[in-house]
Image: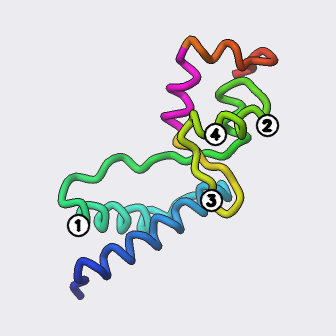
């Protein structure tokens, strides 16, 4: 079976949505689903796929940043957060990079346990 460009983009969009939803629900991504998503991404972008991003929610981001969940929601624009179905999701790498910057000290309300 061969997919035209429009069909491949539609399939990739739905697979990407499914992966994001599974990440939000903290469910594992089946290897077949991850593989198919990577192949579609390669076909669409015409290059090697980037590493699949690890999306995290507000609670995980608050643990990484050592601050409250409310503070994470307030920082969402600075963290390049995306609002999906009323929930904020963040790229783990961007949150960890933000945590490493010196300006993070002013947001800490309590010591980090990690």
Residue identifier under label 2 = 70
Q: In whole angstroms, how far apart are the C-alphas of marks 2 and 4?
A: 10 Å
Q: Which mark is residue 84?
A: 3
- Label 1 secondary element: helix
- Comes first in the chain, label 3 or label 2: 2
Q: Which residues are magenta?
A: 92-101
Q: Quadrant of the N terminus?
A: bottom left
* Main SS, magenta residues: helix
Q: Is residue 21 above or below residue 7?
A: above
Q: Residue furthest left?
A: 46
Task: Where is residue 108? Give x, y as percent.
Answer: 74, 18
Which circle, 2 or 1, is nearer the viewer? Answer: 2
**Are discs 2 and 4 less than 8 Å apart at CB?**
no
In the rendered view, does 112 fall on the left or right side of 77? right
Q: Residues within 10 Å of mark 4 (few under 14, many from 20)?
A: some
- Comes first in the chain, label 2 or label 1: 1
The residue at 66%/46% (across/down) is 57
Residue identifier under label 4 = 76
Residue identifier under label 1 = 43
In the rendered view, does 33 fall on the left or right side of 101? left
């Amino acid at each position: 079976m061969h997919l035209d460009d429009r069909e491949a983009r539609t399939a990739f969009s739905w697979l990407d949505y499914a992966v994001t939803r599974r990440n939000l629900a903290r469910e594992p991504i089946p290897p077949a689903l991850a593989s198919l998503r990577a192949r579609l991404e390669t076909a669409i972008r015409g290059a090697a796929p980037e590493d699949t991003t690890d999306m995290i929610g507000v609670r995980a981001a608050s643990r990484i940043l050592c601050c409250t969940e409310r503070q994470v929601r307030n920082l969402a624009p600075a963290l390049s957060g995306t609002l999906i179905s009323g929930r904020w999701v963040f790229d783990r790498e961007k949150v960890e990079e933000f945590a490493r910057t010196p300006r993070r000290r002013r947001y800490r309300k309590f010591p980090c346990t990690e």
